[in-house]
Image: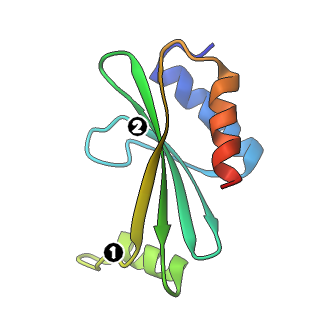
Amino acid sequence: MINDSTELGSFLKKESLRLNLHIGHDTHYDAMNWELSWWQGKVLHRLDFQPLEDNSLTIKHLREYFKYLPRFLHWCHRYIPMFPYLAHITWNRVSTNTFPIKEDDISICITHSLST
């Protein structure tokens, strides 16, 4: 069982190693979120785990579509000041849960997102 954001982070770190995914924490201003990401062709997929104050967890799957040179343009945006983000972003909510959460439920969300 995963009881809080700290335990969620530990579990996601293990899953990222097992599945060869990138992991990030606190990816936008004071969000305290966890994020798994991977590339499939010209699309950057991000699975965002956002713990909320009411003891709930929202999981969103974001897809960032690039027309050309996806990794290069993503790198430019991250490391060159004022470089525009040239991806089209779509997202959908995968799940909303309340802590404590079964590890299997999180694993199922990750596996399902990897296959879509």
At a point 68% along the width and 33% down the height, the residue shown is 107
Residue nearest the viewer, comparing 2 with 63: 63
Above/below status of 16 relative to 51: below
| Residue 31 horizontal/vertical position (percent) | 31, 38
Disc 1 crowd rating (10 Å Cα; few below 14, some 14-19, many 20+) is few
Secondary structure at numbered mark 2: loop
| Residue 19 horizontal/vertical position (percent) | 74, 47
Q: Quadrant of residue 53?
A: top left
At a point 45% along the width and 75% down the height, the residue shown is 75
Q: Which mark is residue 33?
A: 2
Q: Earlier in the sequence, mark 2 or mark 1?
A: 2
| Residue 96 horizontal/vertical position (percent) | 46, 28
Three-letter amino acid code of the residue under disc 2? Asn
Above/below status of 36 relative to 8: below
At a point 69% along the width and 38% down the height, the residue shown is 15
At a point 76% along the width and 42% down the height, the residue shown is 18
Judged from this view, the residue extending furthest toward the right is 18
Q: Give the left or right position of residue 100, taking residue 113 as reference.
A: left
| Cβ atoms at labels 2 and 1 below 8 Å apart | no
Judged from this view, the residue extending furthest toward the left is 82
Three-letter amino acid code of the residue under disc 1? Tyr
Which residue position holds label 1? 85
Residue nearest the viewer, comparing 90 with 86: 90
| Residue 41 horizontal/vertical position (percent) | 65, 74
Q: Could you tell me which quadrant the N terminus lies in?
A: top right
